[in-house]
Amino acid sequence: MKKNDLEYYDLNADKWWKQGETLHLSSHLNKSRFEWFKSYIPCWQGIKVLDIGCGGGLACEFLAKQKANVSGIDLSLNSIKVAQEHARESLLQIDYQCGVAEHLPYNENTFDVVVCFDVLEHIEDLSKVISEAYRVLKKKGLFFFDTINRTFQSKVIMIWLLEYVVRQIPCGLHDWNKFINPQELTDIMESTGFGDIVIKGFDLTDGTNFKTIRDIFLKGLNNQSQDEKAEFLKIRINDDTSVCYIGKAVKA
């Protein structure tokens, strides 16, 4: 079976903004992401932001509504088309482009902030993407990210459980070998020039991974409403980086 199959995003691009769909759950995650980022950027007005791997534009629109100056780039052309159309319907000015994270079509020292969510575990050249994020950031610019750790726990939850058992995520979307240990990511960022790195657990299971596994088996996540799914995905920013983690770094 093909792993890290990114065709899923092109084939399901129309589902980014549909309540109850897997892709739309990113909207729920954004609430916790930006609540944590608030300690670093309490006000987004006038901030120039790039979203690497923006998908259908959920994070971009969240930022645009906070009066940020937003650009988004994604490998999926269909997702970009959906993002552009939804921004027009929402009367939001967002600069979207289709492209790859390893070769960003922006000048150096362009953005105050770069965000990258659910992306680093999919890309072909991690060091190159980190280098590109660094290049397009202004001096003292912030890089916000989240990704998945390469552990036994992440294999059980993100692949075996969510892909093969309850099929909340399509089989083959992830490749466990591309998951990233936090120290590996820290080393790459530091060698690129980032400093003041902070990494925290992005715990989607309310601090109790195995309790959530039990609950998913008992109720079946696919048969629940959007609100019930969000209830399962109670998010804590804590010290448990065993499955997912979130972080920030500063361009020196």
Image: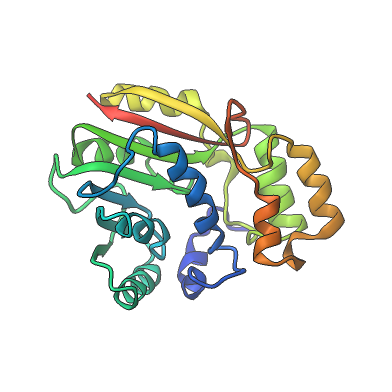
Give whichever of 190, 142 is nearer the camera. Answer: 142
Instruction: State the residue in front, 155 or 205.
Output: 205
Question: Of residues 34 and 12, which is closer to you in this image?
Answer: 34
**Residue at left 68%, top 39%?**
206
What residue is rendered at 49% in x and 50% in y? 31
Q: Could you say which quadrant of the image residue 25 lies in?
A: bottom right
**Quick one: quadrant of the N terminus?**
bottom right
The residue at the point 12 percent across, 47 percent down is 107
The answer to whether 141 is drawn above or below residue 98 in the figure is: above
* Residue 246 at x, y percent in the picture: 48, 36
Front one among 64 and 1? 64
Instruction: Residue at 70%, 67% (x, y): give it.
Output: 225
* 79 vs 184: above or below: below
Seen in the image, is 152 located left or right of residue 26? right
Percent x, y for residue 57? 38, 63
Count of numbered marks: 0
Counting from the top left corner in percent of width and height, residue 138 is at: 17, 36
Instruction: Please state, as top left, top right, bottom left or bottom right, where the C terminus lies in the image.
Output: top left
Name of the residue lying farthest toward the right: 218
Give the image's coloring scheme: rainbow
In the drawing, does residue 198 fall left or right of residue 42?
right
Name above or below for residue 142 compared with residue 49: above
